[in-house]
Image (cartoon, rainbow, N blue to C red):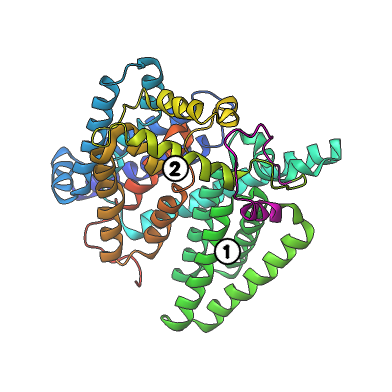
């Protein structure tokens, strides 16, 4: 009987692992309209049958954050029902389905430290292969057209049909996972070399993707982590090696791919005029104060979103009506650039405030940020802390939930990170 149970458990683990890898592959098959749905369904189904109903009930009782996650979804449903624009509301609600599916599938299983780390390692390998493919295609178009624009930002990810900001997030996660695996597992020489090469390659990809906040988070994280392992864990060679590698790689990509620096030069041009009909700046072009850019647009859009929030601060204006209400404010301010380009508010927290009010933001922060952060810190989970922090910072300048991939990534990774065995010490916090 014991042998049979072990065999059954092994099969379930294999199916679960395969479903995770299928999910990661599906992220890069956006040319297939149903790829995200197929990946989500595969993971959800495998997780449902991975453990017993009794185990799931016990985990739900232990993991208090799941109740707040569920409550946030209920608020979204009420927000939809209270909206006049049901067509837009349906679209926005469907994009947020991962916020319900993953917490009550992945969120109700337990993974060991080793299981979680292996899955993340596999994810990093898949991400690296996908980045090689998209870089190869971008280089082909660059040589074909003699246009270096193909090597940067959203043009770089054209082959996989992703916005660079979301690719940057999973690139960051892959770097964290590779470094963590390198420092915490005994590996043969060639495996260590491959991981180091992978880290270097993904650093270059991160630079070319030119997502400001993801680049800053990545570089700052690796820098602080290097100091941490030197001072706290006394791994002097590894820590100093990381610092030296950062300097060398940063210098190399700056020399060979200088246009990304223009993304940071935009921060010097923060003034704006709502009525300006100027075009949006491009990192490959000349930056001038009269152009719209990522920095001054956000400074212009956030007060508009705040004005929408103040119309109904408790419950919000409704998930279906939030865009209509935002565009009314745009019209009041004669912000034609934002209207013509269909810009959202570019801040996930502000978007939640607009659509579901203070109640919605409270439930979201408690269920998806505060309680998960407490859990990873108490569990001494370095890797979980880095990934969770990356998402929470990234949402300051992007509206993740209005994009299918954004909601999918966030909805998946948070419950996944928290699915480790209760009480198991993961890291060395």
Q: Nearer the viewer, mark 1 or mark 2?
A: 2
Q: Residues within 10 Å of mark 1 (few under 14, many from 20)?
A: few
Which percent across, then down, holds residue 194? 61, 61
Confirm whether residue 406 shows in the render.
Answer: yes
Up/down of 91 relative to 113, above or below? above
At a point 45% along the width and 68% down the height, the residue shown is 185
Q: Quadrant of residue 175 in the image?
A: bottom right
Q: Marks 1 and 2, how far apart in space? A: 40 Å
Element marked by disc 2: loop
Residue 87 vs residue 111: left or right? right
**Residue 253 located left or right of residue 371:** right
Overall secondary structure of the magenta section: loop
- The quadrant of the picture occupied by the C terminus is bottom left
Q: Is residue 411 above or below residue 234?
A: above
Mark 1 element type: helix
Out of 18 and 322, give the one closest to the viewer: 322
Q: Position of residue 254 (x, y in %)?
A: 73, 61
**Where does label 1 land, which residue?**
191
Residue for point 63% across, 43% down: 293
Residue drawn at x 60%, y 39% is: 273
Residue 346 visible in this rendered orientation of the protein: no
Q: Which residue was labeled with disc 2?
A: 347
332 vs 214, nearest the viewer: 332
207 part of magenta stretch: no
Q: Would you say residue 264 sits in the magenta stretch?
A: yes
Q: Which stretch appears magenta? A: 260-283
Q: Nearer the viewer, residue 194 or 76?
A: 76
């Amino acid at each position: 009987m014991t042998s049979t149970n072990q065999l059954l458990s092994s099969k379930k683990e294999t199916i679960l692992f395969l479903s995770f890898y299928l999910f990661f592959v599906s992220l890069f098959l956006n040319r297939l309209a149903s790829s995200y749905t197929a990946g989500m369904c595969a993971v959800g189904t495998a997780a449902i049958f991975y453990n017993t109903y009794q185990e799931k009930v016990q985990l739900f009782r232990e993991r208090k954050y799941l109740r707040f996650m569920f409550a946030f979804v209920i608020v979204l449903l009420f927000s939809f029902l209270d909206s006049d624009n049901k067509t837009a509301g349906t679209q926005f609600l469907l994009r947020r389905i991962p916020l319900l599916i993953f917490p009550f599938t992945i969120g109700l299983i337990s993974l060991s430290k080793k299981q979680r780390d292996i899955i993340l390692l596999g994810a990093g390998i898949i991400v690296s292969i996908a980045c090689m493919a998209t870089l190869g295609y971008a280089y082909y178009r660059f040589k074909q057209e003699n246009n270096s624009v193909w090597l940067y930002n959203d043009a770089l990810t054209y082959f996989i049909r992703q916005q660079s900001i979301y690719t940057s997030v999973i690139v960051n996660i892959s770097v964290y996972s590779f470094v963590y695996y390198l420092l915490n597992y005994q590996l043969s020489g060639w495996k260590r070399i491959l991981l180091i090469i992978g880290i270097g390659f993904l650093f270059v990809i991160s630079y070319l993707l030119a997502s400001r906040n993801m680049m800053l988070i990545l570089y700052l994280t690796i820098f602080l982590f290097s100091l941490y392992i030197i001072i706290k864990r006394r791994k002097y060679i590894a820590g100093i090696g990381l610092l030296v590698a950062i300097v060398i790689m940063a210098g190399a990509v700056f020399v060979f791919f200088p246009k990304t620096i223009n993304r940071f030069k935009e921060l010097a041009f923060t003034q704006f005029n709502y009525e300006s009909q100027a075009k949006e700046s491009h990192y490959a072009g000349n930056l001038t104060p009269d152009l719209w850019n990522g920095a001054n647009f956000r400074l212009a859009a956030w007060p508009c979103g705040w004005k929408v929030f103040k119309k109904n601060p408790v419950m919000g204006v409704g998930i279906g009506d939030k865009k209509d209400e935002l565009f009314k404010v745009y019209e009041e301010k004669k912000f034609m650039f934002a209207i013509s380009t269909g810009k959202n508010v570019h801040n996930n927290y502000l978007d939640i405030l607009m659509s579901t009010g203070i109640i919605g933001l409270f439930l979201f922060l408690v269920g998806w940020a505060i309680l998960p952060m407490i859990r990873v810190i108490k569990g001494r989970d370095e890797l979980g802390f880095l990934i969770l922090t990356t998402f929470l910072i990234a949402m300051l300048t992007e509206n993740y939930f209005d994009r299918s991939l954004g909601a999918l990534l966030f909805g998946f990774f948070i419950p996944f990170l928290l699915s480790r065995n209760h009480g198991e010490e993961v890291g060395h916090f």
